[in-house]
Image (cartoon, rainbow, N blue to C red):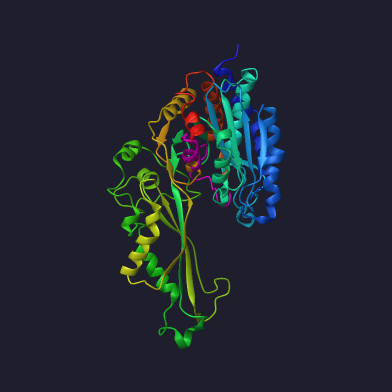
């Protein structure tokens, strides 16, 4: 007789016996970075040779579509329909990664080879996002094996390959395929847990707003001996302009960028007692950085942050004795749904002018990924949390949005689905940098949790099946 416990045991056996590790090693070995044009073929190969055959074995129909935006990676759409009257779950992942950054990895590590050191499985994509969507599919495989090939609900999958370039083309794709993608909920995995040992659900993500600050004073550099101390140095002016945006301790001084009235009361309640933790190998949590008076959880999940992603003046690779002609910085705001990104550039212009920096230009201001949020009290959130708590035997921490960005807004806006993100990684995983890794302990919990969740989704007591799918079809 098939049982829930049997499905969870099967998923754990897949992990404990090394089958999942070997599977992940094959996925990591495909250098599917979307940020390097030289690997465009590998991005497509990841979907075609690694994911499509696996999904076909699991009973999906699979189609790989060209991205609506030329020059960006393809998008895989798969569905497994047992009965249109059953609840329909949409899941999501991305097969592309950031650049390998081969030269930055410590020996004997390398981005396109899975290396196991104790509890850490190193390799590009191990945490972001190959390891996470692969865990969920492996859990599904265990449930289907236990139930004799039946799931008890319908499942659809979108796997894109341009997430690391801002999910360009995804919104147009989902809009064009809204009827095919109609579902009751989106349940996917990406991003970090609040701490490595704390099962987590995020009901949205912060958005990302990007802009350049530039100051151009002359056509070329001038001799530092003859002109130093007489003519403006653009690097110094830009440094002071940045200091007018954020103080020495990371407090944002453009107060119009922040949630009016502080962290909303409902968000503060949701984050009460929420832990935040990572790894000293990756970064430190500095208590004196950011908005004073907020907890660490409120700073990263309920507030906005300002980051200078890159800046340059002169020739860093070969400095010359000249006062530079210009200076440039690429900046980012991570923001929650409680602020309007349309106000960011105008309020910054006003702020810089009032601070005495009219010569600093704001250029290329744009949203890269909009913010999203589902009510943490949504029935689908409660259902998922209860399922994971039953499997793992401990409380799940629900947060209103993750600190990073994901294209959840696309699915919420166009398909009217609740967003339930169940991450399997942690803040110190090294994603977007060298030495990226997946923690084996968290991964083992993830495969077990999703086996229990897929089983429960097929038991017939999910929240209001059909409601949101009907709304999407009528929209």
Q: Position of residue 34 (x, y in %)?
A: 63, 51
| Drawn side of residue 475 relative to residue 295, left or right | right
Which residue shows up at 54% across the image and 71% down it? Answer: 316
Compared to residue 274, the image places residue 240 above or below, namely below
Q: Nearer the viewer, residue 209 or 314?
A: 209
Farthest-out residue, left: 261
Residue 417 falls inside the magenta stretch: yes
| Drawn side of residue 134 relative to residue 253, left or right | right
Residue 303 falls inside the magenta stretch: no
Which residue shows up at 50% across the image and 49% down it? Answer: 282
Compared to residue 81, the image places residue 316 above or below, namely below
Q: Nearer the viewer, residue 118 or 195?
A: 195
Which residue shows up at 65% across the image and 45% down it? Answer: 74
| Drawn side of residue 70 relative to residue 217, left or right | right
The magenta stretch spans which residues?
410-435
Is residue 30 visible in the rendered image? The answer is no
């Amino acid at each position: 007789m098939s049982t829930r416990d049997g499905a969870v045991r099967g998923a754990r056996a897949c992990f404990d016996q090394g089958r999942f590790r070997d599977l992940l090693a094959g996925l990591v070995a495909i250098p599917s970075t979307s940020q390097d044009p030289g690997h465009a073929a590998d991005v497509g190969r990841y979907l075609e040779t690694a994911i499509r055959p696996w999904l076909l074995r699991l009973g999906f129909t699979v189609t790989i579509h060209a991205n609506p935006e030329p020059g960006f990676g393809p998008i895989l759409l798969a569905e497994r329909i047992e009965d249109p009257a059953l609840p329909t779950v949409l899941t999501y992942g991305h097969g592309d990664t950031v650049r390998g950054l081969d030269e930055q990895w410590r020996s004997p590590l390398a981005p396109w080879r899975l290396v196991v050191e104790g509890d850490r499985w190193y390799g590009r994509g191990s945490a972001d996002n190959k390891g996470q969507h692969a865990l969920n599919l492996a859990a599904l495989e265990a449930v289907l094996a236990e139930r004799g090939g039946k799931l008890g609900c319908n499942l659809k999958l979108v796997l894109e390959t341009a997430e690391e370039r801002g999910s360009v083309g995804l919104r147009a794709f989902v809009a064009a395929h809204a009827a095919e993608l109609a579902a009751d909920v989106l349940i996917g995995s990406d991003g970090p847990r609040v701490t490595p040992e704390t099962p987590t659900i995020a009901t949205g993500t912060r958005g990302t707003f990007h802009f350049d600050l530039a100051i151009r004073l002359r056509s070329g550099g001038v001799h530092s001996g003859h002109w130093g101390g007489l003519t403006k140095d653009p690097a110094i002016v830009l440094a002071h302009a940045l200091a007018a945006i954020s103080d020495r301790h990371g407090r944002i001084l453009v107060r119009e960028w922040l949630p009016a009235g502080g962290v909303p009361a409902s968000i503060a309640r949701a984050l009460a007692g929420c832990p935040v933790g990572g790894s000293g190998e990756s970064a430190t949590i500095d208590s004196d950085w950011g908005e004073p008076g907020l907890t660490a959880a409120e700073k990263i999940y309920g507030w906005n942050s300002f980051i200078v992603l890159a800046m340059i003046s002169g020739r860093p690779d070969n400095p010359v004795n000249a006062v530079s002609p210009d200076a440039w910085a690429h900046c980012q705001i991570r923001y929650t749904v409680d602020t309007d990104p349309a106000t960011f550039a105008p309020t910054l212009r006003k702020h810089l002018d009032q601070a005495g920096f009219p010569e600093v230009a704001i250029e290329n201001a744009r949203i890269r990924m909009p913010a999203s949020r589902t009510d943490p009290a949504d029935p689908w959130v409660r259902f998922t949390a209860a399922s994971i708590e039953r499997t793992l035997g401990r409380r799940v921490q629900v947060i209103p949005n993750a600190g990073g960005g994901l294209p959840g807004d696309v699915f919420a806006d166009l398909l009217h689905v609740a967003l339930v993100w169940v991450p399997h990684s942690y803040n110190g995983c090294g994603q977007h940098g060298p030495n990226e890794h997946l923690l084996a302990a968290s991964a083992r919990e993830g495969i077990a949790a999703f086996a229990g969740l897929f089983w429960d989704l097929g038991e017939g007591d999910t929240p209001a099946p059909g409601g949101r799918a009907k709304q999407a079809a009528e929209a």
